[in-house]
Amino acid sequence: MPGPLQGLKVIEMAGLGPAPFCAMLLADMGAQVVRIARPNDASVAPEGVTARGRPTLALDLRQPEAVGTVLRMIESADALIEGFRPGVMERLGLGPDVCLARRPQLVYGRMTGWGQHGPLAQAAGHDINYIALTGALHAIGRAGEPPVPPLNLVGDFGGGAMMLAFGVLAAVIEARGSGKGQVVDAAMTDGAALLSAMLYGFRGNGRWGLGREQNMLDGGAHFYRCYECADGKSVAIGAIEPQFYALLLEKCGIADPELAQLQNDAKRWPEFREKLAALFRTKTRDEWCALLEGTDACFAPVLDWDEAPRHPHNVARDTFVQLDGVLQPAAAPRFSRTPGEARGRVTASADDILGRWFEGPSRPE
């Protein structure tokens, strides 16, 4: 069945990181997405997982006829997304003013690290730099050590690609009512800051300190952190609520009254962490799974990239799929009537791509 975004037409200016992931999300949900890439550009090779589900149209945008092709495509597009530094699209002759003149209903999604304006707008950077500016990176890691990069999940994908997808779809909905498009300025600094809203709330009411491993969600609390097991593997504990915490202690055979009664005494957390660390080192990860997994103790094994797809829960939900010889995450979220679908590499000639794009009437003005 077609996904919930069937009929949405999106032009993706191929690049790296969050913009391709945003386009992948839209394509997974049934949007008709065409990637426009420079010929023989290895940096945006179509075999990458985030390039799945849509064809790549090779165009040399230094050539006027190639720019003209994109402008003709824009005349029937709902959205365009790009992830270049501010000014690059303008220099190509494809800036928002030009594109919106061709298609007043167009949603023009712009993905950058620092945003379209501000003192850092033209500076180079990566995920780690963007989240450093928001406070998020400072909060992650061990006490007394430098912060630990949370891969590139917070800036590139959570604060970047998903915010861009949200912004583009919100603007498309508005444009279908107003008949007017607009520019969506998605900055990873803005998005990562927004992801931290709850933590800023905690900080504002005195419930979050600036030091690492002294707060409930940063590994400071003995009931919300990872522990090493006898086999060197790890488990994750998240027993915040008192009833779940009590069950954790019961399942683990802990009869320590202080541990039971002083759960939220932050001054005792370092001591309690040591007690639980010693306990979890007495069994292997699989032994702890047999005892705790599936209960309300808020427990999970910490799985690596190879183990996660084989876990029975992920298998039951088809969380991972095999496409083009690569095991990768399936489309999400799930829809009861119009499910999305992760589709593999799409290869097509330029004539086929453009023929499909231009077939049928454009969306009414």
Image (tube, helix red, strand yellow):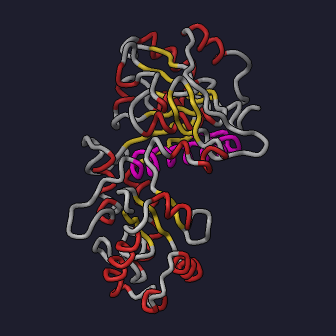
- Name the spot of residue 39 as percent of width and height, x first: 40, 13
* Residue in the foreground of this view, choosing between 290 and 305: 290
In the image, is residue 166 above or below residue 138?
above
Residue 177, magenta (yes or no): yes
The answer to whether residue 177 is left or right of residue 186 is: right
- Name the spot of residue 102 as percent of width and height, x first: 56, 25
- Name the spot of residue 117 as percent of width and height, x first: 34, 47
* Residue in the foreground of this view, choosing between 201 and 340: 340
* Residue in the foreground of this view, choosing between 182 and 145: 145
Quadrant where the N terminus is found in the figure: top right
* Boundaries of the magenta span: 153-181
- Name the spot of residue 86 as percent of width and height, x first: 34, 37
In the image, is residue 305 above or below residue 249?
above
In the image, is residue 58 above or below residue 97?
above
The answer to whether residue 178 is left or right of residue 217 is: right
Quadrant where the C terminus is found in the figure: top right
The answer to whether residue 118 is left or right of residue 328 is: left
Q: Main secondary structure of the magenta part?
A: helix
Residue at left offset 46%, top offset 51%: 303
In the image, is residue 166 above or below residue 253?
above
Residue 353, magenta (yes or no): no
